[in-house]
Each structure stands twice: as C-alpha cells, then as structure tokens.
C-alpha cells in the first residue's frame, strides 16, 4: 500500500496542525472590529482573470519564506499566466499586526499563506476572506486529506483556506547523549515512539549521568507551545479541548498528573526564560539532551544552522521521537499550511488569485510548491500527478513520514485561541514556581475560554 493511501486511511477521522517552525508562530491576533460579514459559499467554476498583477503575503513556511525559492515559483506562474506576483515576507513576531493594519486601512494583500488558525478561525470567521468552495470539486475532496480539508472549512461550510502541505510536530533527543547514559534502550528507533514509563526512565538515566537539567518545559511565551501542550497531554492521555472545539479541557486530571510528574522529576525544569526557539538553541548546543519543540524543518536543518543534517553543533546525532504516551501511541500536534484570498472587492484580482492557488495546489506544479515548503503534501494526486513519492530521494523526509499516522486533533481553531495560548504558558510559569497544579489548571483553563 502506498504511503499516501495508508496515511489517508489512518487520518480520515482525525485532525491536524501548529507552527511553521517551533521557534516562530506568534499569537494569532484577532481581526479588527467592523469585520465584513462572510458571504455564502458559491460553487461556480473559476474563470481566467483579466488582472495583470496580484500580491501575496507569506509567513515563513519552509522555503516559502525565502525570496529566491519563491521567486522561482512565481516567475514560472507569471510565464504561464501573464499575471505578475508581488510578494511580501512576513515574520511571526509582527505578521499578524501587519495584516490587521492592512485590513483596517483597506489595503490587504490579494493572497495570504499560513494556517487555518489565522485564515479560517480568525480572518475568515471575521468576514475578510473569499470562500474557495468553487475551487474544490468532488475529485479534490477525495484527494485532499479529510482532516486537512475539515480544518480549512469554517463552521458555516465556507472553505477559507486551500491546503497545500502538512506535517507533524514532535520532540527530539541527542542520541549520542542517550547512548552515553545507557538511555537509548528506552527508545524505539524503528517506530520513533516510546512509552511514558520509558521516557521517565530515560530522564532518570540522563540526569544520573550528566547531573544537570536534560529537558526544559519552556514557558517564556507562546513560541513553540505546541510542544509543551503535546508533552503534557500525551503523558497520561489528557486532552486540551473538547471535540467540538468550543471549550478548553486542560483541567483534565490526567494533565494535572502529567504536570505534577514533570515538576517532581529531577532533570526536567520549568524554564520561564525560554520559548521554543530558545529551547532548540540550547538543545542544538548540547546543553539540553532532549527538545520538545521539533518538526521536520528542524530535523533537516537544526536551529536553521545551514548544516542540512540532523546533528548538534558538536556533531552529535539527533533522533526525532513522538511524544511519550502510556501505550506508545501518541497524538501529535500537526501543521497545515495553504492559501487564502482576502476579499478586496476586485473580482479580477480574486479570479487571478484563484488561478494562483490552483497552479500551486492542484496542478502539475504542485510537487514543486510542496517541496518549496519542505513539508508533506495534503493530497495523493493533483490533476493526475502522483505526489506520493516526491520525497523518495530524501532519506530524512522518508523516515519522518512514520509519524504522520500519529497526527491528532487540529484544535487550534477553538474559540478564543489567542487568549488560550497566553493562558497556557502563564499557567506553566505558575506551576514551575510551585503553585498548586489543580488550582492553576482550573483557573487558566477557565480564563482561556473567557471565564
């Protein structure tokens, strides 16, 4: 059975996603007030555009954040369609503010590239995006991963994001350090999974050998918070939200158990001086022996160091791992990225933007667009073009694919998401300071939903 077919079978009932890179992904700032009401989704075919140019703003999603890589893609699109594309590159630190300011001033870009928590749950839900239902026919619905498609669809049925790629966020270990401490016996490097019991045995062995902190529950801010959420939720099977994505459930007793165990374990430190990117840097430098903020982008190029290999700065081998769970079957946070169109009232530019989306996400050019993102395609085929083997020549990508069936619920579209992220890391700080865990999780889970 092909990888893509297996993945589709295993993921059909689940949801995905997080950040483009663990060190990035700032808070999703709510759209400005006075949002335009969303129009009902249409199902008519898109027509060729008469527009001569469009604008694209993109967050740093793999090499979609690099001008040279993106220019090659947009130049090819222009050569085929005659439509010029002007690109602006956003950073997670201030990207949301730039978009919201542009929306308030009435000069938003035609296209935006990011994930559903922004395009669907924020700007789409607030009436700023064009429904893309007319771009998704029955064949597309069969080809696109069902969980990804669901995440890109608003509660009213409007599709505000056309997905291109997805990935699974995970953790990583310094394999040489594990071997030195005799802790590698607790890793299953074939499946890249381990149990909660073996995780804590490994921490004990590492701490006994090195005599210092080996893993950090970073909580300086929201950067990379998908890692700390997944760590806590998976240890004993807790949840973060309800299935309907209307409430936060991290006051689950199983999460309380996990937080207490982490705080009581020598070798694990709650560190309010570190966010996700800081943790990666310390791990890459060898100071930490495991990292909870990891994904394929980091595995391909740790800490964006330009080395292009899974090694620490001192040459030690990095192995990616799923988060530990009691039975070894964790539910990973995932990432979905694609394109949306802002409704600027210019039908010609909207049509041109739709041409761009189909060119990148559903054509013979889709493999190039996926490879530019350095993630995995959300679909098996695009207009008859097989996408299942596009990473066959990349051993790291091929191996990493073992994690894809472990993708869990994409809950980043839950009500009041921006507040929830702040409440989560603030809660972790309080727990690290010694506050009562049960009281803290109850207080901040309530705060997250606006209580």
Image (tube, helix red, strand yellow):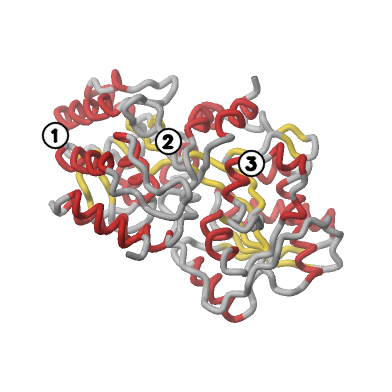
Q: Nearer the viewer, residue 437 or 210?
A: 437
Q: Is any part of residue 186 visible from this angle?
A: yes
User: Which residue is labeled 1 in the image?
Assistant: 211
Closest to the camera, between mark 2 and mark 1, is 2
The residue lying at 32 percent from left, 58 percent from top is: 221
Above-or-below relation of 312 to 361:
above
Q: CA distance from mark 2 to mark 1?
A: 31 Å
Q: Secondary structure at mark 1?
A: loop
User: Which residue is labeled 3 in the image?
Assistant: 371
Q: Provide residue 330's location: percent of width, then percent of height.
A: 40, 32
The residue lying at 55 percent from left, 36 percent from top is: 13
Q: Which mark is residue 331?
A: 2
User: Which mark sits nearer the N-terminus, 2 or 1?
Assistant: 1
Instruction: Answer whether labels 3 and 2 touch (C-beta < 8 Å).
Output: no
Instruction: Answer whether labels 1 and 3 touch (C-beta < 8 Å).
Output: no
Q: Which quarter of the figure is the N terminus placed in?
A: top right
Q: Is any part of residue 339 visible from this angle?
A: no
Q: CA distance from mark 1 to mark 3?
A: 42 Å
Q: Classify mark 3: residues with Cα within 10 Å, few (<14), some (14-19) or many (20+).
A: some
Q: Provide residue 338's location: percent of width, then percent of height.
A: 62, 52
Q: Which quarter of the figure is the C terminus placed in?
A: bottom left
User: Which mark sits nearer the N-terminus, 1 or 3?
Assistant: 1
The residue lying at 37 percent from left, 25 percent from top is: 328
Q: Secondary structure at mark 2?
A: loop
The number of numbered discs placed on residues in the rendered structure image is 3
User: Which mark sits nearer the N-terminus, 3 or 2?
Assistant: 2
């Amino acid at each position: 059975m092909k990888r893509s077919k297996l993945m589709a079978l295993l993921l059909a009932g689940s949801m995905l996603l997080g950040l483009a890179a663990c060190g990035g992904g700032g808070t999703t700032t709510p759209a400005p007030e006075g949002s335009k009401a969303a129009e009902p989704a249409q199902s008519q075919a898109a027509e060729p555009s008469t527009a001569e140019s469009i604008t694209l703003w993109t967050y740093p999603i793999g090499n979609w954040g690099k001008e040279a890589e993106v220019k090659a893609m947009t130049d090819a699109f222009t050569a085929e369609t005659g439509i010029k594309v002007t690109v602006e590159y956003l950073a997670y630190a201030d990207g949301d503010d730039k978009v919201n300011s542009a929306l308030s001033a009435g000069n938003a870009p035609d296209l935006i590239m990011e994930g559903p928590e922004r395009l669907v749950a924020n700007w789409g839900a607030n009436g700023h995006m064009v429904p893309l239902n007319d771009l998704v026919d029955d064949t597309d619905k069969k080809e696109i991963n069902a969980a990804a498609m669901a995440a890109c669809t608003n509660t009213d049925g409007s599709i505000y994001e056309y997905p291109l790629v997805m990935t699974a966020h995970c953790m990583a270990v310094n394999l040489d350090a594990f071997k030195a401490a005799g802790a590698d016996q607790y890793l299953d490097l074939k499946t890249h999974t381990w149990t909660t019991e073996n995780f804590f045995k490994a921490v004990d062995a590492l701490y006994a050998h090195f005599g210092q902190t080996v893993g950090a529950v970073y909580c300086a801010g929201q950067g990379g918070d998908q890692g700390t959420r997944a760590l806590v939720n998976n240890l004993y099977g807790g949840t973060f939200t309800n299935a309907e994505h209307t409430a936060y459930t991290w006051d689950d007793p199983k999460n309380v158990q996990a937080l207490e165990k982490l705080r009581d374990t020598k070798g694990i430190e709650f560190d309010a001086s570190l966010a996700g990117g800081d943790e990666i840097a310390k791990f890459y430098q060898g100071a930490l022996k495991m990292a909870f903020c990891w994904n394929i982008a980091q595995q391909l190029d740790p800490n964006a160091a330009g080395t292009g290999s899974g090694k620490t700065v001192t040459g030690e081998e990095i192995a990616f791992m799923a988060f530990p769970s009691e039975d070894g079957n964790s539910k990973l946070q995932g990432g979905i990225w694609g394109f949306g169109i802002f409704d600027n009232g210019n039908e010609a530019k909207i049509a041109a933007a739709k041409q761009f989306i189909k060119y990148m996400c559903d054509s013979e050019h889709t493999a190039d667009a996926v490879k530019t993102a350095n993630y995995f395609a959300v679909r098996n085929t695009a207009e008859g073009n097989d996408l299942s083997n596009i990473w066959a020549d990349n051993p790291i990508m091929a191996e990493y694919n073992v994690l894809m069936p472990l993708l869990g619920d994409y809950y980043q579209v839950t009500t009041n998401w921006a507040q929830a992220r702040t409440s989560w890391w603030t809660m972790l700080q309080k727990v690290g300071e010694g506050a009562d865990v049960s009281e803290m999780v109850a207080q901040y889970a309530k705060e997250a939903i606006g209580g």
